[in-house]
Image (cartoon, rainbow, N blue to C red):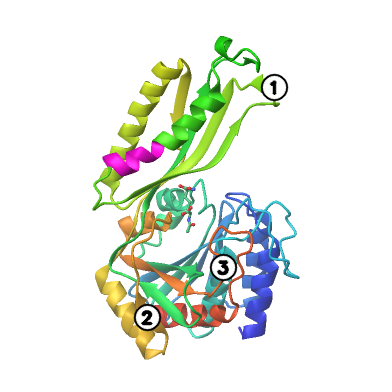
Amino acid sequence: MNKEQLIKIRRDLHKIPETGFKEHKTQEYLIKTIEQLNHTNVHVTKWKTGLFVFVEGVNPKRTIGYRTDIDGLPIVEETGLPFASVHKEYMHACGHDFHMTIALGALSDIASKPIDDNVLFIFQPAEEGPGGAEPILRSETFKQWNLDMIFALHIAPELPVGTVSSREGILFANTSELFIDFIGKGGHAAYPHLTKDMIVTASSFVTQLQQIISRKVDPLDSGVITIGKMTAGTVQNIIAEKARLEGTIRTLRPETMSIIKAELERYIKGFQYTYDCNITVDYGSMYYQVYNDGHCVDKFRKIMDSIGVNYLEANAAMTGEDFGYFLKDIPGFMFWLGVDSEYGLHNSHLNPNEDAIAVGVEAVTKTIRRMN
Ligand SMILES: CC(=O)N[C@@H](CCC[C@H](N)C(=O)O)C(=O)O
């Protein structure tokens, strides 16, 4: 595929972001595009709203996996781009439109000049939640391919185009979603002493929660608790009976996740007593850390050197990725692809530089062709 075709695909996909396990139009678009490649060595299997695309090798001894995520986020786009999302409440604000386009570009290249080994392209739904990787790994459809190696990329807004970045060992954090519900007693704004005000309770909880990080996590270790959404109350003169906090916990070690959760549950018990209310916690979906195989990263670095792509050593990041579940079972790695955007991931103004698509296709294709 040439640059213009790839950019058209990226823009088409950018217009139709859909959230986890609702990627119906996206799946339809991907199937149509793959069918147009018109290769007899390519076999498409639907899996929920995602796809497995198997490219037969000419003399296969191994099967290499390449995974892209396909879902968007519930963000109202503010880029003002002519190809902005037509799904008004949703946006590809984490680069999955880039990820899919690069996977299609690599798929087209590999299918037209097949390598010895088989290649499985995985178009995975629901990376942003509730998580598509774990159910894929459990599915009988996926198990039949018995992958020898797998890799994936993620766009990096802060890195220049022409740059990739990775590291041996941990790249992305362990994550757990966090949903906390507070139930007290509502009433008249003028009679607070007759109520149990859940706005006061939840607000106090949000600020005290950060002490778990500062006082219970070893300063040489790391953790993050972010509350991204708080809902409570009905109107200005009624004391809120209910409040809900929605957030996420991130750690660089699975053990630290357990420490934070145990402490959080102690806080909940304390708050129930102090504020005389009922508090429940739900951890939603959890992602295992992305832990890169040293041999694969070393080989990748050499491949990038050989094609003139600038390789930078990465730091571990507190972003999460359910790709970590693949790497728990299969050797492989993930890398960052520089896309040079002033605005970061999950920002309504994110505008990655489309020149990075060709770099991504080249990096992925050459890695598939030369990794052994
Ligand atoms: C790369 C990226 O931004 N991934 C998401 C993964 C979300 C995990 C889950 N829904 C959570 O919020 O814990 C991220 O937010 O890091």
Q: CA distance from mark 3 to mark 2?
A: 22 Å
In the shown orientation, is residue 59 left or right of residue 236? Answer: left
Q: Residues within 10 Å of mark 2 (few under 14, many from 20)?
A: many
129 vs 151, nearest the viewer: 129
In this rendering, which labeled residue sits more in front, label 3 or label 2? 2
The amino acid at mark 1 is Asn
Residue 14 in view, yes or no: yes
Q: Residue at x 49, y 51 (%)?
A: 132
196 vs 351, nearest the viewer: 196
33 vs 255, nearest the viewer: 255
Q: Magenta stretch?
A: 209-216
Q: Which residue is mark 2?
A: 311
**Which x, y percent locates residue 237?**
69, 22
Q: Residue at x 40, y 79 (%)?
A: 367
Q: Earlier in the sequence, mark 3 or mark 1?
A: 3
In the shown orientation, is residue 286 left or right of residue 96? Answer: left
Q: Residue at x 62, y 12 (%)?
A: 191
Quarter holding the C terminus is bottom left
